Amino acid sequence: MDKEISVFADNWNALGWAGVAILLWFAWRSGDLARLKDGARLNLFLGVAVALMVMWQIRTGVKPGLSFHMLGASLATLMFGFWRGWLAASLAALAAALTGKASLMGLGLESLLFCAVPAAVTHHLYRFVDRRLPNHFFVYVLANGFFGAALAIGAAALASTAVLALSGAYAMGYLLENYTPYFILLAWSEALTTGMGATLMAVYRPEWLETFDDERYIKNK
């Protein structure tokens, strides 16, 4: 959702902001944000947020509201879990809006569609893999990093396509021809970046990945 003016009607933007408010309330209630009181964790979180801000500045688009850029939400979720992963990506969305790359009014929907949706998909896939598949390094990297990131951005693409069509911003036929298919290219880039990032951190900085336990995935093999 680029440009300074949102392509959505005010009621859709209001729904987006209401959704963000609800998520923030649940995030606070979960107690997960209290982990940022630790200085080392806070520094890492802010560093990742800044990196995502840079990533979100590099974008292209065909029409207002139809922009393409990498998300980074999957890697942030593997590092911090759902709540802080979503928040880090949302800070990147906020920076994009403040710099004129996206609509400030549409920031709520941006946060839900391109931050919360991929973070939720990554989180739930991780939980499934953790319960059902062997505790193996390559299973973690391939399933959560590569496949998980591709699945997450695919879910974000479908969700944004549905909202854009239901809101009347664009016709579904136009979106399916000129918008949604291009996320296939982004999915490959997102998967490669997330998988490589998760691999490097698992090897050299496993403490940065809160979803990764080197005792389970490496040392006991």
Image (cartoon, grey):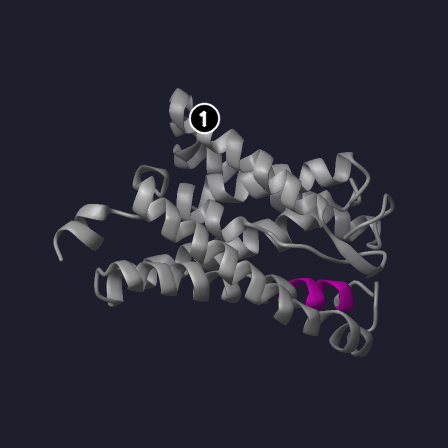
At a point 80% along the width and 50% down the height, the residue shown is 2
At a point 78% along the width and 36% down the height, the residue shown is 99
Is residue 128 visible in the rendered image? The answer is: yes
Is residue 22 visible in the rendered image? The answer is: no
> Front-most of 201 and 103?
201
- The magenta span reads 159-165
At a point 21% along the width and 60% down the height, the residue shown is 135
- In the image, 187: left or right of 138? right
Report which residue position mark 1 lands on.
42
> Front-most of 204 and 116?
204
Image coordinates of residue 219 in percent, x first then y, are 15, 50
- When asked about the image quadrant of residue 196, the answer is bottom left
20 is higher (above) or lower (below) than 198: above
Image coordinates of residue 58 in percent, x first then y, are 71, 48
- When asked about the image quadrant of residue 162, the answer is bottom right
User: In what element is the residue under mark 1?
Assistant: helix
- Badge 1 amino acid: Leu
Q: Is residue 162 magenta?
A: yes
